[in-house]
Amino acid sequence: MSELLPSGDRPEEAAVQDAEFAPEPVLPEPVRQRVIALAAAALPALPADEIPLPMRRVARFAPNRRARLGGREIAAQLTADPLFRQRISGRVVEDARDLGTAIASGVAPGAADPVEVAALAYLARPDGWRELIEDAGHAVQAEADSAAIAHQVRDAEHRAVRAEHDRTVAKVEADKLRDELARVREELGQVREEARSAGKALREAQAAQKRASDLLATEKGRASRVTADHDAEVRRLKTRLAEAEALAATGKAAAKDARAADDARLWLLIETIGQAASGLRRELALNPADRMPADLVADAAADRPGSPERSQARAQDTDDPGRLDQLLALPRAHLIVDGYNVTKRGFAEMSLEQQRKRLITGLGGIAAQTGDEVTVVFDGAERVHGLPPAPRNVRVLFSRKGDTADELIRQLVRGEPAGRPIVVISSDREVADGVRRHGAYPMGADSLLRRLSRS
C-alpha cells in the first residue's frame, strides 16, 4: 500500500528513503554523550505514536535518569531508525534556536562549542555533517592533548619543586648530623672519663663488700639468738590471745541477751505510744482532712484536667516491684507518678490519650487496693481536653505553661509534712536525686509497670 502513495503524501518516509546508507561514523565520547543527552531531553516531547516501542519505556524515566539508564537504547535506536532520528533532530534543532538553525543549514559558527556542533550535526545531518563530526573529534582530541600536556607540565614543575625541597631538607639534615656527630664525640669522651671513675669506685666497693660480709656473718649469729627469743615470746602471746578470745565470746553472749531485753522493752514502749496516740486522736476529735498537702500545691503550681491550660512530666530510680509494695504498705503513703515517663516506657505504641487512660485506670486499682493517696503528673506541653473522671483517691495534674512536670513533682514532695512516706515513680535520675534530698523514696518506672501488670 505504501508503494502506491505519492511521495508528496509521505514526506517523512521519503526523507528516510533518501538518507545516506554509509556506515555510521565513530563519535568521540564527548559527542556521543551529548547526542544521548539531547535525544533523552527531546524524547518526551514527541507524540506517543511517533515514539518507537523500545523507547516508550525510556521516555517514562525521570529526566535526570533518562540519559544515564536509557543511554544505550537511545544510541541504538538513533543508529537503527533514521525516521526516529529525524523526529528527534527536529525537536533538538528547534530547542537549539539560532545554533540549531545554522547547523541545519550546514553552517558551523566559529565561536560555537565543537562538541555541541558535532552532536547537532549528527542528529540533523545537513550537507557535510560527517566533516563537522570529524572536526569536532579533532578539536576534542586537541583539547585532551592540550590538557595532558598541561598536566605533564604541572607534574614536572611539581617534581622540580619537590626535588628542590628535598635537596634543601637533605642539606639541613646533613648539617644536623654533623652537629650530632660532634656532640656524640664529646659525650664519648665524657663516658670514657666516667668509666675510669666507675672502675675505681667498683674496686673500692668490692673491698667494702668484703668487710660487710664479715660483719654479716657476725650479725647472723646474733639474729639467730634473737629469733629464738622472739619465737618464745610469740608462743606466750598466742596463749594470752586464746584466753582473750574466750572472754570475748562470753561477753558477746551477755550482750546478745541484753539486746533481746532492750528490744522487748522498746516494743512495749511503741505499743504504749500507739495506744496513747489513738486515745489523743479520739480526745481531740480530729476528723480526716478534706484537703491534702498535694491539693494545696496543685492549686498553686499545677493545672487540673479541664482548666484553660494544663500539662505533663518525667523522673527515675530502682525497679523492684516488691520494694514498691513495701513502701505502699506504709501508713498514709502518698504515691506520686511521673505520667509520661511511665507511659512512654510501657505503652509507647499507644496514642497519648490511650497512654493516659491506661495509666490512670491502673493507678485507680492501686489506690483501691492500698487506700493510699495517688497523684499522677503529666507535662502540659499540649492542651488536654475531655479526660474521663479520675478514680477515687487518684489526683490527675498537668503542669502549667512555662513550668515542667519535674518541678511540679518536686513542689508536691516539698509540700508534704516531714516524716510522711512519699513514693515518687520516675526513671529520670535528676528528678529521683531531687526528691531523695527532700526525704521521698524514688522508684523506677519499671517497678510500677510490673506492679500494674500483676493487677
Image (cartoon, grey):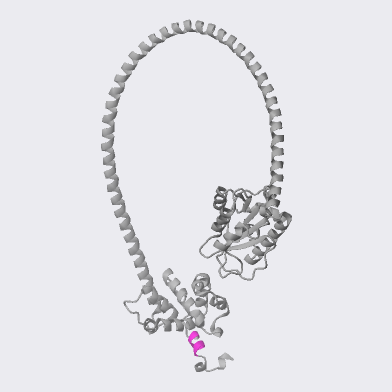
Q: How many marks?
A: 0
Q: Is residue 372 visible?
A: yes
Q: Is residue 312 visible?
A: no
Vertical placement of 269 versus 30: above or below?
above
Q: Which residue is at the far front?
A: 283
Can you give x and y, in whole percent of width and height, for residue 308 in the image?
56, 70
Q: Split into 4 quadrants, where in the image is the N terminus?
A: bottom right
Residue drawn at (35%, 79%) of the image: 108
Front one among 194 and 68 = 194
Residue drawn at (62%, 51%) of the image: 422
Vertical placement of 433 versus 348: above or below?
above
Please check the rendered image and state whether residue 357 is part of the magenta-colored stretch, yes or no.
no
> Residue 360 falls in which quadrant of the image?
bottom right
- Residue range (magenta): 11-16
Can you give x and y, in whole percent of width and height, for residue 279 in the image?
71, 48
Front one among 452 and 301 = 301
Overall secondary structure of the magenta section:
helix
Q: Split into 4 quadrants, where in the image is the C terminus?
A: bottom right
Can you give x and y, in whole percent of width and height, for residue 240 in the image?
63, 14
Does residue 51 appear left or right of residue 148 in this picture? right
Vertical placement of 236 versus 112: above or below?
above
